[in-house]
Image (spheres, rainbow, N blue to C red):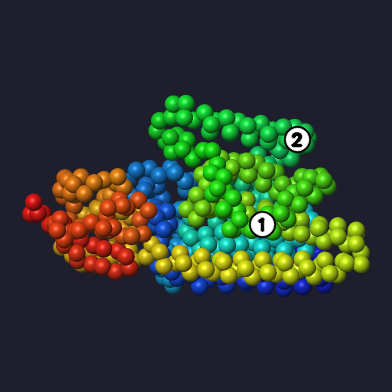
Amino acid sequence: MSRLKSTGKKNKWHWLVLLLIVSAGVAIKFKFVFQESLWPDEALYLYIARNLSIDMKNLTDITGDAFFKSPPLLMYILSLFPDFRVVEFDEASRLLMILMATGTIVTTYLIGKKIYQPIVGFIAAGLLATCPLNNWNGVRILTDGPVVFFIYLAICALVYDKKIVFYIFGFSAVVTKYSALPILLIPLLMKLKPRIWSISYAGLFVSLFVFVASKPFLPAPKGALLYFYHFFSLPNLHHMVEETKFFMGYFLIGFALIGIVLTVKERKYSALFHWVCVFGIFRIFLPWVIFRISRYTMPLYPGLLVFAAYGCHGTIQMVAEKWPAYKKWATLFFVISIGSILFDHAMKSLELLKQSHNTFVGFREAASFIEKQPQPHVVATGSPRQMKYFAPGFDVYDINPGISPDNLRSFLSENQIRYLSIDLWSPHLPAWCKTFDYHKNGYMLIYEKNSVYLFKVLKNFQ
């Protein structure tokens, strides 16, 4: 900010434009802060955070086991908000996610401004403010938004030559999500000669390819390593192409490639360039399932949009140099093109948020209903994380997605489960649950709302 203040009178206009961009990004997401929708991972993080607010050492999941699948920083930050009296805990947490997403927009501007020039920063910030992927996940209480925030704060610190600040935010990113680990390698990569780091990137790509291609022939590790082992796989090219086409579009993809080519040509090998290279290689070999785990690509988007902005600006300059008479027309064409992309992506963001805010709802009311029923409150459900978050005093059992109706009945009997919760939101619900005749098989429907069905398990049914 002190650097921006030194730009004189133009600084006021810079801040005004940036304020408009940030306001657009906030406006797109703010309507959905107070939604009821709660994804499984969101419920898990909130459940852990609430426990940490009582006991800072209680880093356990809904089963009581030590939680290791994500680093704990986000849960510890969220643990500051359970007693926030103005809004509900989940709503306060969503406001925090929006604040971090807004910070990423500002940081993207600062990075683009410093490496290239202010207009590149403005375009990149505008593209990020309307980006469907970042907006769709920007209101979700997941590690993906915060890790992007910390990663780009670290990159920004390095771009502005603040090494200590870089390591503070870089370490914060790593303890938010394991996939941020490569950020700590950026200072080392920047010290290497282009021939060395280019060979290193090629070697990393080949090594990962050989590893994932050999997995069917290798013994799988045991214990916690098995969880991370399954994350690496050969890319699904169809989902990779469809995801990138939907969330970026061919126009931005083309300009991002032009921006990268121009960066290499001009030898502007910044921290941003190296981050996109090294994380991009890792991302290729992480799972690709569009709309299910598209958020894995989020750490690349601010960087790619900076390159797209630079590619657009660089193309205008090349056209102006080659055909000076058409400079104004070329500029007008690109302004209209970028404007149409911003509008289209903003509408796409709103549509995605509108569709998803009506999914994974109804758990709060369902849990409240069971609480008023006779004890013991022992529940089997396809969405154990949401049920446990809204009713921490319940004994909650997860329904195995491969279980048969007869085995489910035996499972309920063995564990003395009194209530069965079937919701159509669960991605792990056995397929037969949606058409099963519960009444004829010893289950009494006691509640139905928002695609959540509660049944009382009749003990004397034969």
Residue sitting at 78 percent across and 36 percent down?
194
Q: Horizontal placement of 162 versus 408: left or right?
A: right
Give the residue at mark 1.
Answer: 250
Q: Is residue 97 left or right of residue 60?
A: right
**Where is 136 relative to 261, above or below?**
below
Above or below, 98 against 411 in this view is below
Which residue is at 52% across, 59% downward?
137
| Amino acid at dot 2 | Leu
Crowding near the residue tagged with mark 2, few <14, some 14–19, many ≥20 C-alpha atoms within 10 Å: few
Judging depth in this view, the residue of 311 and 225 nearest the camera is 311
**Quarter assignment of residue 184:** top right
Of the numbered discs 1 and 2, the one sitting upstream in the chain is: 2
**Secondary structure type for disc 2:** loop
Location of mark 2 (residue) = 192
Give the Cα distance between marks 1 and 2: 33 Å
Whether residue 393 is visible here, answered yes or no, is: no
Report x, y in % for residue 29.
54, 68
Three-letter residue code for mark 1: Tyr
Instruction: Say which of marks 1 and 2 sits in front.
Output: 1
Image coordinates of residue 38 in percent, x first then y, are: 41, 61
Q: Which residue is rendered at x = 62% and y = 41% of the image?
A: 281
* Residue 390 appears left or right of 210: left
Q: Is residue 218 left or right of residue 416?
A: right
Query: Looking at the image, do the residues carrying marks 1 and 2 touch, with CB atoms under 8 Å apart?
Result: no
Give x and y (percent) for residue 280: 63, 44
User: Which quarter shows the N terminus?
Assistant: bottom right
Along the viewing direction, whichever of 78 and 356 lies nearer the viewer? 356
Q: Quadrant of residue 90?
A: bottom left
